[in-house]
Amino acid sequence: MGSCGTWAWQELLVLLSSMWLWVDSAQPTPAGPTPQPGPQLRFRLAGYPRKHNEGRVEVFYNDEWGTICDDDFSLANAHVLCRHLGFVAAAGWAHSAKYGKGVGRIWLDNVNCAGSEKSIGDCKHRGWGNSDCSHEEDAGVICKDERIPGFKDSNVIETEQSHVEEVRLRPVVSGARRQLPVIEGIVEVRYKDGWAQICDEGWDSRNSRVVCGMMGFPAEKKVNRNFYKLFSERQKLNYRLHSVSCTGTEVHLSMCTFEFYRGNASAACRAGMPAVVSCVPGPLFTTANGHKKKQRQQQQQQQGQQRIRLKGGAKVGEGRVEVLKSSQWGTICDDRWNLLSASVVCRELGFGSAKEALTGARMGQGTGPIHLNEVQCLGTEKSLWSCPFKNITQEDCKHTEDAAVRCNIPYMGYETLIRLAGGRTMFEGRVEVKQGSKWGTVCSDGWTTKEAMVACRQLGLGYSLHAVTETWYWDASNVTEMVLSGVKCAGHEMSLSHCQHHGTSLSCRNTGTRFAAGVICSETASDLLLHAPLVQETAYIEDRPLHMLYCAAEENCLASSARLANWPYGHRRLLRFSSQIHNNGRADFRPKAGRHSWVWHECHRHYHSMDIFTHYDILTPNGTKVAEGHKASFCLEDTECEEDVAKRYECANFGEQGITVGCWDLYRHDIDCQWIDITDVKPGNYILQVVINPNFEVAESDFTNNAMKCNCKYDGHRIWVHSCHIGDALSEEANRRFERYPGQLNNQIS
């Protein structure tokens, strides 16, 4: 028994010593099979070529970026990693450094997840930094292209960030300290708990261009070094970087070559002063008050001549990229779309370098032609049109591959002047704004989707889902005073203060916190547009007997003169056409009113979920309305959908109404009210105009494409409808030609 016990004791000592050796050899990783990483754990996708939702997985641990080995990798591992990156799930994974070899540490190996873990650190693995792999075995993931709602850390396409994560411009000129945006100052990088400077030895304009791009400015300019030299001689500075060398095309300073200082850095900068940068702001961010009117005029002129624009983004400086070619706006295919090309777009539009190069129609699908494919900019071009590209062929791309960008924009501090109170989530609540040093509410008189859109943009919360005019159930703060009234926005403003308002002369019909303005914001929104060719193909005239129009009269679908007609004798002349309304956005289009408040119409035996869903107008060439019609939402439903998209909405049996993303609702020409009553219209040349969601009742990502226009000639018996197009699809010059159209001399349309 004794000898047996001695043997067991020796065995235990050997086992313990081997465990100690294993732990010691794996330092600095913590012991145990499932170590818990600290709060500094972060993830990103990297590599090339790739789209925004795929790439080599890199993890930031122990102040260093590294990769994950593909040994024992599985789809369950990819699920956990994709959730870290803000996607709902994984669609697949890649092995053998498909997205290129990483650099630095290989942090994880033999990772084995069940798939439900909250963190990759909860999965089994060999321990942090313990790997027998090379970078030829770097793992990658392909995530499902659907974001986790409310996920904040966007998936930025980037290369290795070294140890330079955060950069700022520190103004030192007295007047500049209070002004935003900061356009000039000392370049500083985040270091430990403070900020450090960069030695300007060898610093040139290309380095300045990169810093300005990061700060949201399109260009750099020369700076008065003498002033800063005097300033720096009186300051104690802490230098962190030196020998910075950029090509000028990088989107982040960390992508340039540089060296870190070791030891006593203060005495090491031979040039004797910190790097200083002065930037040129784009038109939207120029602060000189004396020139504001002139700048606005210049901006309008530039926009008139501009051949590139952003559409569908919630914030300034983001959106689907559209280009003008042959007088028609179209999109760019995302093949080979990257940060270099995206940065050329951003700078051309007056923003900084690109923060993200988005693929897969992340800002909604465009319409019309896809003009360009495989755009490959070097990053030095002044315009996207100077970059090499391929002309598109029909087989190459679809609008599901429309390219988009998120640009760096200057920090303006607008989000510090607004907040939400009392909501159940961060996306909703009563709007409170800061006037001077005082917080107060906003009067809800005239508070519509457009004002709510601006509030959500200023808050950085995306689009407006609802504009709320009674907020008594959100009365959760001690703010009771109203400080803003008469707010009227165009919808594109960056801040509520940029909209029209009463100023200090407050006037509100319903005072008190009960009627303070509120919002419900959303990261996504619908985007409706009419299929213009179908209107052109299906338009015709019908003389319909009055005895068949009683229900239509009840729905107010006839001209006012119909009330004076000799019912049931006689007829009304109707211009009929089909309308097919597509949802090209990123959220379903749902009526504002819930089912409980839909109105039943006995005559047609259906519910109206929206009183006015579309406006139909006949206009003279100078814009005077000569006939009008409107269409209530008899039934919003998915008539047809794109391939792989399932129908969600059907009106039968009091079903839910709406239009799913990727589906369309068809109103055929032969149903009631799908017409304009032109009985009183004289022969002549006119414009047919159809406007969807005309009262902005339901939020959309883009209201500028809600109108469709056609030229038409009416000779008293027949009508010719042609040149139908979405309102913002043509160039300014083409629109002017459309409006100056002299009319048809015959029925031949060239």
Image: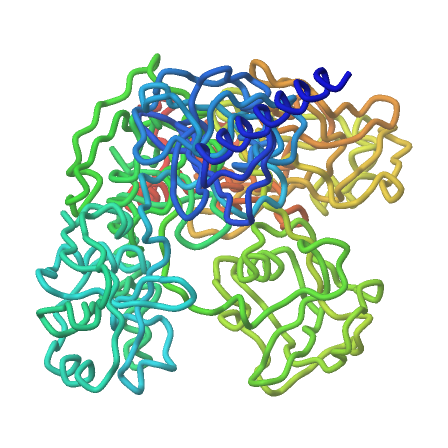
Q: How is the image coloured?
A: rainbow
Which residue sits furthest front? 2
Is residue 395 placed above or below 443 in the rendered structure? Answer: above
Quadrant of the image for the C terminus?
Answer: top left
Image quarter of residue 64: top left
Is residue 354 placed above or below 170 in the rendered structure? Answer: above
In depth, the one of 686 and 138 nearer the eye is 138
Q: Position of residue 533 (x, y in %)?
A: 47, 24
Image quarter of residue 580: top right
Residue drawn at x 58%, y 50% as measured from the top left: 463
Q: Position of residue 430 (x, y in %)?
A: 72, 65
Q: Can you see residue 711?
A: no
Q: Position of residue 578 (x, y in %)?
A: 60, 24
Is residue 215 placed above or below 364 in the rendered structure? Answer: below
Q: Can you see residue 382?
A: yes
In depth, the one of 616 and 714 nearer the eye is 616
Left/right placement of residue 353 relative to residue 502 reads left
In depth, the one of 196 and 37 nearer the eye is 37
- The number of numbered discs placed on residues in the rendered structure image is 0
Left/right placement of residue 381 relative to residue 197 reads left
Image quarter of residue 136: top left
Left/right placement of residue 345 relative to residue 570 reads left
Residue drawn at x 45%, y 41% as measured from the top left: 28
Q: Position of residue 68 (x, y in %)?
A: 43, 27
In depth, the one of 416 and 645 nearer the eye is 416
Residue drawn at x 21%, y 87% as measured from the top left: 234
Quadrant of the image for the N terminus?
Answer: top right
